[in-house]
Amino acid sequence: MTRKLNYTYFLLALMISSMAIISVKGQKIAAQSNKYSRSSVTPIYIRHSDSRLSIFDYVDSVKVSDKYDQNFIGENSMEVNFKMISENRIKFYELMDQSKNSKNLSKEDLANLNSKISEISKQMSFEDSLRSFQIVAKLRLTKIPNRLLANLLIDNKLGYMTLAKLEERALYDATDSDVMQAKSSERNMSSIKDRAVEMLNNVYFWVYDSNEYKVNSDEKDSRLKTHYLRGSVYLIKLDMDLLNKNGQFDDLIFQEFNTTKLKAFREFNFPVKVIMRKEFSSSANNYTIDYSGSVSNALSNLSKEKSAPSEVKYIFKEDNQIQKELVDGTMFSANEIFTTDYEPFRVKASVFASNPIRVKIGLKEELKVDHLFRVSEYRLDKLGNPFEKNVGWLRVKKVVDNRKKADGKMEPSTFYKVFSKGVDKGMKVQYFKETGLVWGLSYNALPDNIFSGPMLNIDYITNISPGLRVGLNVGGFTELKSPTWNISELTGVYGSGLSFKGRNLIVEATSQKIIQLNLIEITPYVGAYYSTTRMTSITIGNEELSALKYPDIVKLAYNEIGGLAGLKFGINFGKYTQLNFGYKLGFTFSSELKSDNEKEGTKIIGSLYGIPSNLSVGFRLTGF
Amino acid sequence: MKLKIILFAYLCMPFLTIGQIQDYKNFNYEVQFIRTGLQGTELFKVFAYGRNEKQCVENAKLDAIKALLFKGVPGSGSQRPMFTELSEMKEHNDYFKSFFKNDGPYLNYVSISNDGSINENDRFKLGNKLKIGVIVSVNKANLRTELENAGVIKKLNAGF
């Protein structure tokens, strides 16, 4: 028996270690050796022919993230002669609404509906490509690229082109290494300024084509409203490659006052290309919760024995604030989407030092604590061809403020391993966009406890402190049997023992701090829980009263609220897999047995199902 | 046991010395001219091999000097090598051995020209070895003076 058990453990250990080895073994990736360089962005908001949106009062003052240089053209809106929402899109939304409520439809009607949706989707796709064509045409017609380039290149006082602005950007973009090299060269910082023209290769427009603005009211309190703005956002690039290939840009340069050249520059049809179109969404509430009021209310209510439910105080926002937040939200949304999908926007750098792991990036690159980075290195195959090999994953531990021009003495930010082989100096690190949510499943193994049963675990990466996460766990759905309670009053009727069977539901909210030791994680956490156990049978003495016989029993629930603390040990097998084991202990604050027919339940001292505690085994399925 | 270690070390010594001699005669390196530096210096990008980053960087310094001395660097002010009489190399063997020894005088004429970082695109792993591109600054003027004074190369004004 012992031998068999040992063999099982051996197999389990072998499986775990081989999984780890397989996962650590990096995969080959096509080499991408282009250097990361800052991009510049101009947001453009399309003003449709039928648009009544108020956001246009705020789009000119919108600010792009620190990761980009912002290009100013004076006015960030562009009028077009098509409608915000086309007839086809309205029809599409109507059909989608019908599809959501399709439970009552017959099979034939459903097939008909789906065919209509498919047909209209095709039409919309054609319409979208036409819309994109119209947007680009309008962008060029209204000479927005000309205005942008004029702002970047032409000195209004001198009346001709200078590279002063772009040189400043090149200096801001330069790394410590660039600066040190420049300083030891004859031309000094001019060698960095030479890269000013290269900055024109990273000029982008984010063109917002909104197609829906709606205001939803809260079901319980109609004063509380949420404004939604959604639509498409186009990533459009100034096509300098084309201009340089044709040599047209050289003809446009004028470095002394020349009205003919200036006119030619202003009238030139600068080429742009659409890189991608994505859906954006932004929302803003018309209120904030007055937490100072709520806290003082809660404190004063604590002193009262039976408190009336405390009223949450709201501070209502002015419309201009809501509109401004909506516009800011559009920038945030586009940045998130494009950073995920567009490689040049994903920050990359090299490891500056390996113990601790340090990289010379920081707030200038919009770095936040716990941001995830992929580490890789270039290798040469037998023929000497380079390929990229994955080494592992890091998270940011400490972020430095590097929002200044490099001087050769910039402090690096610090990183920690979450799943990585040895990280050496010079290896490549590249930002990897996450949703911020980490999903997992766990099973609480000990029976007959309010913590028993399977659970869905959702953790949110807070980006406040390394490894600090908040979690929501929901689960249970398991039949529990309480210990038998001896009630002296029952003696002589059925016997003195009383026990309950029920099916539990448990919700936990936790705050956790992951202590990361590369592949290994130790996670202490604290939190609160709410559990409700719906009764399925009650046993009095030897008599079991089942809910099947006595349906009123189902109306009886055991509710418990408490705090909890726990510790979890995890081992990462890869970016998407972690096996963890843990123990948690609950502290009951209040518990009651309550029937659905009653307003108030019967208070119980302690917990009906014994001290809440359990051993868990779980898998994290997404993210580290 | 001690005796054995001493004996082993003694037997290894000639091989170590041969290694040094062979090292400076090894012309397997890649050096590119980057730009002219300050006060008689030139900046080069050297792709050097080594077991680790530190060794690569040290080898890069060595390779840069070797390139200037024995091979020359295309596109730079040192297209022609400083030492052109390879047939006379044997004559100066002792000098070069001493010049290129570990922490030798060659280090006075070369330095790393950045903040110590390695560009991710200039680092390649090749089996157990590394190939790293490093920007180094070589003080060409002082190097020439040193070699002239040592009589290894002729002075530029010799023969006038």
Image (cartoon, coloured by chain):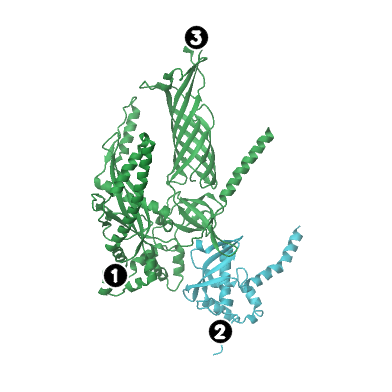
At x 32%, y 35%, the residue is A294
| Residue furthest bottom as drawn | B160
- The residue to which callout 2 is attached is B155
Q: CA distance from mark 2 to mark 3?
A: 122 Å
| Amino acid type, residue under disc 3 in the picture | Gly
Picture colour for chain B = cyan
Discs 2 and 3 carry the same chain letter: no
Q: CA distance from mark 1 to mark 2?
A: 56 Å
Q: CA distance from mark 3 to mark 1?
A: 104 Å
- The residue to which callout 3 is attached is A492
Left or right placement of residue A18 versus residue A160 in this view: right
Q: Secondary structure at mark 1?
A: helix
- The residue to which callout 1 is attached is A265
Mark count = 3
Return the x and y of residue B127 as percentages of the image width and height: 61, 60
| Amino acid type, residue under disc 1 in the picture | Phe
User: Could you tell which of marks 3 and 1 lies nearer the N-terminus?
Assistant: 1
In the picture shown, does residue A184 fall above or below A503? below
Picture colour for chain A = green
